[in-house]
Every structure is written in C-alpha cells, then in structure tokens.
Image (cartoon, rainbow, N blue to C red):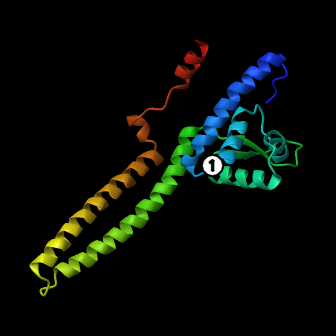
Amino acid sequence: MSLDHLDEKQQESLQRIRKRVIEAIGKNMDLYGVTLSTGHLYGLLFFADKPMTLDDMGREMEMSKTSMSTSMRTLLDLKMVNKVWTKGSRKDLYEVEFDWYQTFTDYFAIKWRKAVETNLQILRKAISEVDKLLMDEDASGAVKEVLQRDRGKMKQAESYYKWLDRLIDAMEDEKIYELVPKEEDDKIKAEDKN
C-alpha cells in the first residue's frame, strides 16, 4: 500500500477514494455470508501492492490477531484470498484472488449445488410417497385430487432444481461466459486510459 511517491494531499485524496471502495466492498460481502469487518479486510488486501502478513493487516485494520485470523480463514475458505510464499519470510502472506469470475463460480456453485442436491432428494422421495398414496384404491376422489395437485407442485419444483443444476454446470464448465461474456481486459485497459 505504499503511497510514498505521492505528496501528502495526493495520499489523502487517494486514501479517501480507497476507503469508499473498501466500505462498499465490505457492505456487499454479506452476499457471500461474510461480516463487514472481513469485507473491509478483503478491501484492504485488494488495494495492497504486495502480499501482507496478519501483523501488517492488524496494524492497518486495528483488529485483534484472533479476528484477523478468523477473517482470513473465512476468505481462504471462500477462495477469495490466496496464501503466498515469499523467499526469506517465515510468516504467512496473503493476497486477493483477482479472478472474481472464478470466486463467484466457486462460491455459488458450492452453495447452490448443495441446496439443489438436498431439495431434489427430498422432492423425489415425497413424489414417490405421493405416487404410492395415489395407487391406494381406498383413497377418495377428493384425496386423490389434493395429492395430484401437490404432486404437480413438487414436479414443478423438481424441474426448477434440475434447471438450477444445469446452470451450475454451465458456470463450472464456463459455458455461462458464452451467454454472458466476461469483460475483456483490453476494453478495461482502454477505458482506464480515457
């Protein structure tokens, strides 16, 4: 985060800009189930010009080492941060994973896949049980009508979860980018020059 080559006014101006971005990142990290302070830590690493140790981050964030460690473990588990090795350093160093597309895919594919599998399993079992009840010759027409209606709703839900499963597959095999292309780095570089 070295801003030594800037004068004091430039440093203050840039720090205000960074602080706004870090605050926004922190607030939006709840999408990933991450606390505000963990989001702020991610924002700090985002602007770091080199990997940082927990001690470095603790000084910048004024957080306890325990909180820093917990936040870093969360970010590592979400694959939003990488542990890096630097020759001559015995401390763990961390840097942001800048492939946000992959971070998004990793997080949501894992969370969604688990929900899809759980819900499909429950729906399939419930449909099977309803089918058995429908075969009961002693069931009245009114009961069978309710069962048919419930079965239809469950089949509709099953169709949704099958679609969601295919969406997850498209994210994981990157076919999603054929439908919604990633921003080209050349476009971004051109925009940065303007």
What is the number of callouts on the image? 1
Amino acid beneath label 1:
Lys
141 w.r.t. 22: above or below: below
Q: Tell me where residue 192 sits by quadrant.
A: top right
Q: Is residue 6 visible?
A: no
* Residue 100 horizontal/vertical position (percent): 57, 39
* Residue 71 horizontal/vertical position (percent): 71, 51
Q: Residue furthest left?
A: 141
Residue drawn at (50%, 56%), measured in percent from left and top? 111
Quarter of the image that includes the C terminus: top right
Question: Does 30 sit left or right of 118 as displayed?
Answer: right
* Label 1 residue SS: loop
Q: Residue furthest bottom?
A: 138
Q: Tell me where residue 96 sits by quadrant.
A: top right
Q: Tell me where residue 57 sits by quadrant.
A: top right
Q: Could you say which is closer to the camera, residue 34 or residue 109?
A: 34
Question: Does 158 sit left or right of 105 as displayed?
Answer: left
- Classify mark 1: residues with Cα within 10 Å, few (<14), some (14-19) or many (20+): some
Quarter of the image that includes the N terminus: top right
111 w.r.t. 177: above or below: below
Question: Does 42 sit left or right of 91 as displayed?
Answer: left
Q: Is residue 61 visible?
A: yes
The residue wearing badge 1 is: 79
190 w.r.t. 107: above or below: above
Residue drawn at (68%, 38%), measured in percent from left and top? 43
* Residue 109 horizontal/vertical position (percent): 49, 52
Residue drawn at (83%, 16%), measured in percent from left and top? 7
* Residue 134 horizontal/vertical position (percent): 17, 78
Residue drawn at (55%, 17%), measured in percent from left and top? 191
